Image: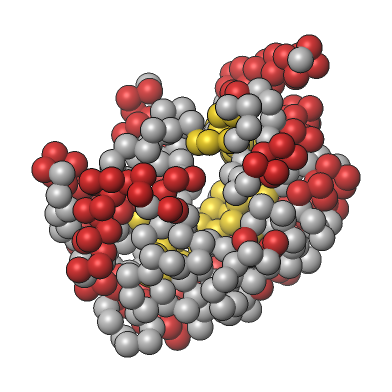
Amino acid sequence: MRLLDRLTLSVVPFKASLRSLTIFKVAHTPRRIWNLIKILTSMNLSKILRRPVVWGIPPIVMVEPTNICNLKCPMCPSGNGDMARPRGRLDLENFKKLMNDIGPYVYQIQFWNQGEPFLNKQFLDMVAYAKRFGVMTQTSTNGHFIRSLSDAKAIVHSGLDQIIFSLDGTNPETYAKYRVGGDFNVVLQGLQYLSQAKRHLKSKRPLIELQFLIFKHNLNELKHIVEIARQNEVERISFKTAQIYSDEQGFEFLPENEQLNRYQFDGQHFSLKSDLPNWCKRLWLNTTINWDGSVSPCCFDKDADYAMDFIFNNSTPFKKVFKNEKYMAFRQQVLTNRKNIEMCRNCTEGMEEPYARIVEMCEQKSIEKFLAEASALEDQTVMS
């Protein structure tokens, strides 16, 4: 099963991926399949030859509706004020032009990066337009803008395939420790509205996932979040280790248990548990397009410091940008000396252990196994 899990090319387990295919609405057209074959072939050829070869375009495209957020999360560049690039919202017409260019070829549009997607009033219109091309659509939200059953039904009607709620606590106090400025009860109410809307409209979509970032202060709530998921008809929970940008953040937020931490501590500083291999599949399978049209190699490029071009400014087709000289040179640098690239030093790509654990709520045995592990981890924490 571990081999099958690796073949999904993500942290989502193979069985969970198969189950998703029965829920998500995706058109497997010859053009889309052929593009996938080309990009996978060129990706593996590049790994063998140690030089970049690119045929086709990425099957997964991250599109940023906005980099503005209503919360002040201390380790998020958008929330804590560290973001240097201009704030703004993606224009619907620019998004339509993008989809007209790439829509027939890609499999998945991920509506997130920095910011809260629902702060863009045109967001659901973008989802609906993307669905015209038969692609799978996802978003990630802090959950503060589903304020009525009508709002929830609009999400279902848009055709959105998956929505991820960030819920890093099981009570108002713990939740607000990281989601500064957030309201736990508002998020929970939004979650309830969406589950209710799905029942009323008899829809399997969107698949609802809770994302729980594991911190020092919420370690004893792993079992409780499972109960919240059960009560609100959530299909999936992802438990993720936290990403930090300074030693101070590490001391404040990271659990001491190494199983719940993607960093190692040498007594003075935190560093990623990875030797950063000279390889990154994201440079073939993914890309990030920010609200202003800047094309970043991935979401770890928070300020678009490595932007390959601006597709909205000069109307350059994305397909050309993906293979331009700058993008190819960046791939070559990753294949040669990835450690020299600043943004790669805090990246999870290449880590031996996954940085996330997926729990499917329909699998009772998996839930019981996870709860047993969570209980053991709590005992270890108390003993230490």
Q: Nearer the viewer, residue 315 or 19?
A: 315
Q: How is the image coloured?
A: secondary structure
Residue at 80% x, 16% y is: 382
Against 232, residue 103 (above or below) is below
Residue beneath the point at 45% across and 67% down:
304
Return the residue nearer the eye: 364 or 333: 333
Seen in the picture, residue 353 relative to 208 is either above or below; the reply is above
In this rendering, would 367 be left or right of 12? right
9 relative to 376 in the view: left or right: left
Please indicate, yes or no, whether residue 254 appears anywhere in the rendered image: yes
Q: Residue at the spot x=41%, y=74% of the render?
A: 294
Residue lying furthest front = 268
Q: Position of residue 66 (x, y in %)?
A: 57, 72
Q: Residue 155: image x %, image y %?
A: 62, 65
**Residue at 56%, 78% in the rendered image:** 86
| Above-or-below relation of 93 to 357 | below
Relative to residue 324, is residue 245 depicted above or below?
Answer: above
The quadrant the N terminus occupies is top left
Query: Residue 336's x, y, as percent?
Result: 23, 46
Quadrant holding the C terminus? top right
Residue 42 visible in rendering: no
